[in-house]
Amino acid sequence: MTAITKKADNPIAHLSPEDIEAIGARLDEIRQEIIDSRGESDAAYIRKMIKTQRYLELGSRAVLLGSIFPPAFVAGTVGLSVAKILENMEIGHNILHGQWDWMRDPKIHSTTWEWDMASPSEQWKHSHNELHHTYTNVVGKDNDLGYGIMRVDEDQRWHPFFLLQPAWNFVNACFFEYGIAAYDLELGRNLAIPKEKRSPEFKAAAKNVLKKVRKQATKDYLVHPALSIPTGSFVPTLVANFTANVVRNLWSHSIIMCGHFPEGVETFEKKSIEGESRGDWYVRQMLGSANISGSKALHIMSGNLSHQIEHHLFPDLPSNRYAEVAPKVRALFDEYDLNYCSRPLVPQVYSAWHKVVRLSFPNGWLATTNKRNLPQQLVALYKISTADKRKRRVMLKLLERKAKQPEYVAAA
Amino acid sequence: MTPLSLDDVLDSFHPLRSGTDLRGRIVAVQPETADAATIVIKPGRDWLGHEPGQYVQVGVDVDGVRLWRCYSLTHGPRPDGNISITVKAIPDGIVSQHLVRRVRPGQMVHLQQAAGDFVLPQPIPRQLLMVTAGSGITPVIGMLRNLFSKAALPDLDITLVHVNQAEPHSIFKDELRAHAAAGRITLVEHFDDRDGLLDLARLESLVPDLDARAAYACGPSGLLDALEEWYDARGLPLNTERFRPALLTDAGEGGTVTFVGGTVVEANGATPILDAAEAAGVLMPSGCRMGICMGCVLPMKQGVVRDLRNGELTIAVPGETDPGGVKIQTCINAAAGDCHLDH
């Protein structure tokens, strides 16, 4: 994708300022309808969800105490994986968004909740709620766009480093919770600073992360396996914990990739958000997110991030109400002729991965490559990669121009 | 929560255990009149006990929202260790209606330790006058029950003036009449529909030796104000218990925001508290500044604020809302009255 304002067929060019204000007003109305009607059944929903998750986790961990027996290993690992997914997605993520603050229950509150995750909740709230949700899909402002390690937008300059990004993305997926912690710390930027010059805030935050990681690792990889020693299940329990963490990481990574990376999601330029009105902000959230269609179970397991569009419009509404909001939001998209990006899970994951692969190559390279010219294209790629900065810039320009030629455009 | 804090795991199995937040389980709900009920609660292990006449703050979830109110304890210490409150449902009282009509045995409530100094001194003055109106009887019935549950009845001369709108509204009337019949108290029942509004001039004729009696009064503030004035004029002491120590601030436009350090900031009704406080040099937590990140949330101990997005009011009244304060987002709320922030 290209920042929306640079596109030849800007998908919001047909909206007048009045339209945008009307969209904002309608969305405020939808939000208010939910606020006015939230109550006991919603409170019961989150409490039941928490309770279910707690019992599932305790039960699975109990079963794993005998995980030397294969059926116990399988059942316990599956249960623990599901429990960890629920804990991070439908419970932790949403509580930390303040979706349940209205209950005034100090235990289920964005300011007090802590979760089973490497990144401490305070720190995650800053990078996620504050930076990502405010500057959603603004190139150069929203670090969620490729997490600072990937190229997910044509407007991000290509570098040979990005050729490895599909592999890199997969590794990140497996260890996603640590990736998020590192990302919340802005580890890359901070490590580049000489040790003695790093800010005290960074040092304090890094210490908190290490403390949290140590605590989580002790629980999953030491205490729980040690409790299984009497049945000789130390190793299987350790493996089960590791597996559950990786499964949870892969799953949450996939869901989150689907939220903003699929083809059809728009990005924005820094200068386009100057003096942005509430309506403008809403429209950016509408076009900067993508949904996953599917069953109720999928919605719950994704923490209702399958309703990513609704979540980005109303990050503080209770997640169990997004499904009810979705048709109203969709009607608004249709009314104003906007693209509501929604696909089932597999196509959406594929689309996101396709983008990661496509943009690991220079703009236009994949589009101009076919079976016949593959050898020449590889040579060209090698040349671009090894050229010095200035030459590379020229070569990238030429390649982009080539991709715009009719034969390739038609093929694409 | 699991597995991050063992406490929360234990709570789900034993919510009344010691070492956790103070809670109680409702044991029984006994109707008293058409619009009043006594709720018997088994408090958590950490309950420190109470003196008759004291009140307890009770937190209940009404329509999903945790709300707190104060209620007088209507028993002395009981052999079964339970505590009881008697609640009168006021017409648009969200919590009182919920407690009288909707709670059921087995449900959990949140509690604070007993508090209040509306208690009888030791030794107890021999001659007492109690003036109660409506549910104002609740702390007094606690005192009476405690006194008369002892094996040796105390040698006291108690006059109770009990005011109600009408006889059917009178809580504990049978119990009080039984005490009167047994000669333990002198009961003066006053019903507005029968006797007209209580005229304090008549009080002296109702209770001739009024000057000699230690006086305790509990009821609506109109009555208490009049009584206080009356006692002051005669230079006599009076102990009162008010149900609403602070009246709800009428929501207006703007007000002062007071911080823990004593800093007071003037904030108008259109400026977020965050901006007003920062402009006045207060170091505030902040984040997105548009109401989505929860980075600026602070507890409000007292006051009223207005959500600038939809005009919704959030009110904090000590004793009625969460004792830790109501958490508000300072970036989208403006003062709608004087506020105290715990920061």
Image: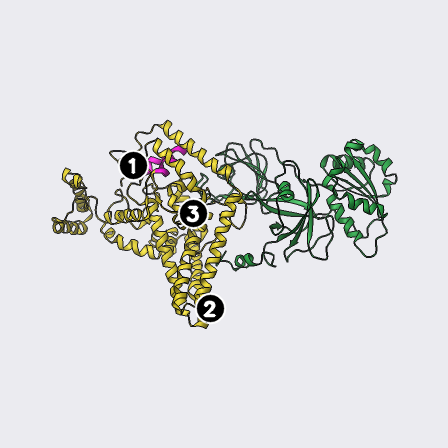
User: Residue A172's x, y, as percent?
Assistant: 32, 55
Query: Alpha carbon of mark 1 to alpha carbon of mark 2: how far?
Result: 55 Å
Name the quadrant containing residue A25.
top left
Left or right: B204 in relation to B273? right
Query: Measuring 26% from the left and 52% from the top, which residue is drawn there?
Result: A165
Q: Is residue B259 within the magenta segment?
A: no
Query: Measuring 45% from the left and 33% from the top, which residue is drawn there?
Result: A29
Determine the chain carrying the residue at label 3: A
Amino acid carrying label 2: it is Leu
Residue under disc 1 on the same chain as residue under disc 2: yes
The magenta stretch is: A268-286
Residue under disc 1 on the same chain as residue under disc 3: yes
Query: Measuring 45% from the left and 47% from the top, which residue is drawn there?
Result: A94
The chain painted green is B
The chain painted yellow is A
Q: Which residue position is annotated with label 3?
A: A126
Would you say the magenta stretch is mainly helix, strand or loop?
helix
Residue A4's label in the rendered image is: 1
Q: Secondary structure at mark 2?
A: helix
Q: Is residue B120 visible?
A: no
Left or right: B185 in relation to A223? right
Which is nearer the N-term, disc 3 or disc 2?
3
Q: Secondary structure at mark 1?
A: helix
Query: Alpha carbon of mark 3 to alpha carbon of mark 2: how far?
Result: 36 Å
Q: Which residue position is annotated with label 2?
A: A227
Indicate the quadrant containing the C terminus of chain A: top left, top right, bottom left or bottom right. Answer: top left
